[in-house]
Image (cartoon, grey):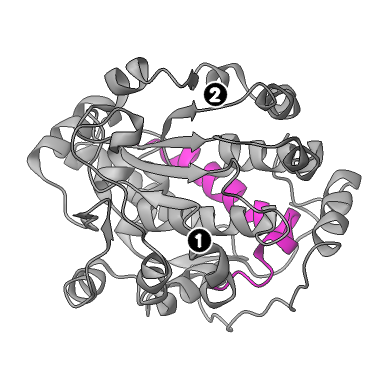
Amino acid sequence: MSCSMEKENDQSKELRDEYHSQTKSDDDSKDDLSNNLVKNTKLELNALIKKAETLPKLIAYGEETQLILSCNDEYKKKAETELRETPEVVAESLKIIRELVKGESDLFVPDLDEFFARFLRPCKWYPKSAFRLMQRYYRFRINYPYIMENMAITSLKKTFDSELFMPCPIRSVKGCRIFIIHAGSKWKPKEHYIYDIFKCLIILLEGAITEPHTQIAGIEIIFDMNGLPFSHVPHITPRFAAMLAEFTQRCLPIRLKNVHIVNQPFIFNMVYAVFKPFLSEKLRNRIHFHGTNMTKLISMVGEKALPKEYGGSDLVFTPIGETLWQYFYSWNDEYEELFQYGYRKKNENK
């Protein structure tokens, strides 16, 4: 599927109706942006670094989960080897992508090198590919506007507080940021709509994308399906699966290295059957089913990076409660600005 600017197709309309049947929505609003490349922004790197130094620590599994906004020599070497990241390539790619964005007059983004790097690094600094990724990313919001409705950290507090999402403080053996999502019995669909789960995931990923190390090394996601009941299955519809697959495979500006499924019961086969028709071969090859045997998971992620319940050596689960929400809420102004970027209007000719 593609992220086109055409009028919503039937699938999009049905998914919108499905969303509205479960939760209320508010009218979208955007601040008026006067320039195609916005220079007055809270997202400038030095401003983020300065603010990060003043915030309370985010503690998960008894360890501080640090937001690292600089890039050390190890990751610089990795970026050069894997992503063609040299000073010459970077300078030329930044120049070209700015020109491409200027030519897309209804696309508004911050005029920051670090912002463009979010799209350039997953595309190995090929500017035309990165620009197409940027277009798809923002057109996704147009094709599925109800996903962006009420995309406010304040409105997602209940879901953040549920401890369905756990960021791991230690990176994998390959330097990836790791997120654990509890999508089995801990998820109560009537309390936490599947669309709110997706919104929280977007906020988590946007935070991860800020980190140069994560841009370079990517992420790994662990879905803990322990206790998944049959009653959850109807909430995972083909329309939702198609939307999520489109976002993950075509629109997400991050290197998704692996998806790990653990503690899945037999009923999970029904869930995977819903997603499978929409998954590319590349993504299917990166999905690993571990069940209750964590040997392969440990070898892929690393013993030190995993909590003890998944075979790790040091990390012990501690309730995170509303700490996660409080942390992201402290960045609320930056998220509000971030979510106002994109296409200002629907251009039927795109």
The magenta-colored residue range is 125-152
Queried whether the magenta region covers residue 80, the answer comes back as no
Q: What mark, if any, has residue 283 been given in the picture? A: 2
* Left or right, 145 with reference to 306: right
Give amino acid for label 1. Answer: Lys
> Which residue is identified by label 1?
102
User: Residue drawn at (70%, 53%), measured in percent from left and top?
Assistant: 189
Give amino acid for label 2. Answer: Leu
Disc nearest the viewer among 1 and 2? 2
User: Residue drawn at (46%, 42%), measured in percent from left and top?
Assistant: 130
Q: Quadrant of the N terminus?
A: top right
Name the foreground residue: 39 vs 62.
62
Name the foreground residue: 171 vs 50.
171
Query: Which percent across, then down, holds residue 74?
Result: 11, 36
User: Residue drawn at (61%, 50%), measured in percent from left and top?
Assistant: 187
Is 154 rendered above or below residue 263? Answer: below
